[in-house]
Amino acid sequence: MAEGKIIVIGNEKGGTGKSTLAMHLIVWFLRQKKRVASVDLDGRQGTLTHYIQNRAAYGVLHHIELGLPEHLTVTVRENPTEQECEADKKAFHEQLTRLQKENDLIVIDTAGADSYLFRLAHAAADILITPINDSLIDLDVLAKVEPETLTVKAPGHYAQTVWQARQKRAAARKRPVRWFVLRNRVMHVSTHNEKLIWKLLEALGQRINFMPLRGLGERIIFRELFLKGLTLLDIGQSKTGVAMSMTHVAARQELRSILQAIGEESLADG
C-alpha cells in the first residue's frame, strides 16, 4: 500500500487563513471517500483542533453525519532542552509514519512561527501551501523588496526555511515538494497594490520555484462557518441550517479553483 501524502499548510506568520484552508482541504478529501488524518501543530492556540471539535459537536446537535478526520494535536515546547527537542522530533516522526500507513492524506496545519517541529513538518511535506494576506507586509516573509524599484531583492526568512527543507528532502532522496503560495483574503476590488503583489509573486516564484495562486477572498462567512465546524462544501446540504447564497457560490468557486490548480482533484482520485 502506498504511503499517504503529506500536505502542509505553512507560513511564519499568523492570521493568513491557514486553519480555514486546512479544514476545507480535509472535508474535500473526506467527501472523496479518502482516509484523512489531520495534525494541528499549534496546540497552544488550537484553531484547527477547535474547528474539528465544533464540527463534531454540530453534527451531534443537529443529528447530521459530518465527516471527521483522525486528528492529532501537538503542542511545541517553549525553550526545550536538546534532549526534549530530540525526543519530540522522534515522537512526531513516529506519529507521522503511522498516519501515513493508515491514511491516504495527512493535512498538517502549522503555527505561524518557526520551531523544531515546524521545520520537521516542512521537510516531510509532499505538497506545501503557503497562504499570505494580500499585502506587502505579509510578502516580507517570502522576499525582501527593493523600496525604490519595487523588485525582489532577496528571499525572505520563510523562503529560506523552505529551501532548507527542500535540501533535507533531496538528501533523503524524496520527491521535490510542490510549493504553492496563495494570495488569501483578497479584496474584491482590483487595486494597484494587488497588481504589484501579483507581479512580485510571479517574479519570486520563478526564482525560488513556487506557483502563485489566488486564494480565498475576505468574507465574514468563514468566521460563521468556524463556529459551526462547517465548510463551504457543507452549505446547501439538508439539515446543515445554512442556505446557499450568491456569496457562498462565489467562495466555493474560489475553493474549486485552488483545488484544481494544485492538482488535488487527481490526487483525491488516487
Image (cartoon, helix red, strand yellow):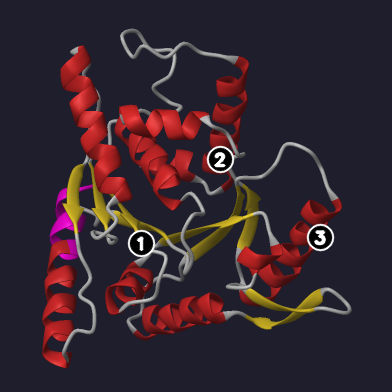
Q: Relative to 160, does residue 220 appear above or below in the rendering?
A: above
Q: Of the numbered discs in the image, which one, if any, rests on residue 110? A: 1
- Residue 231 can be seen in this image: no
Q: Which residue is mark 3?
A: 196
Residue type highlighted by circle 3 = Leu
Q: Relative to 76, does residue 56 appear above or below in the rendering?
A: above
Alpha carbon separation for disc pair 1 and 3 = 28 Å
Alpha carbon separation for disc pair 2 and 3 = 25 Å
Under circle 1, the secondary element is loop
Q: Which residue is mark 2?
A: 260
Under circle 2, the secondary element is helix
Left or right: 124 as drawn, with respect to 13? left
Alpha carbon separation for disc pair 1 and 2 = 23 Å
Q: Relative to 79, does residue 232 appear above or below in the rendering?
A: above
What's the residue at 66%, 45% (across, down)?
Answer: 186
Q: Relative to 229, does residue 235 appear above or below in the rendering?
A: above
Residue type highlighted by circle 2 = Gln
Residue type highlighted by circle 1 = Thr
Q: Nearer the viewer, residue 159 or 111?
A: 111
- As for residue 99 lying within the magenta part, the answer is yes
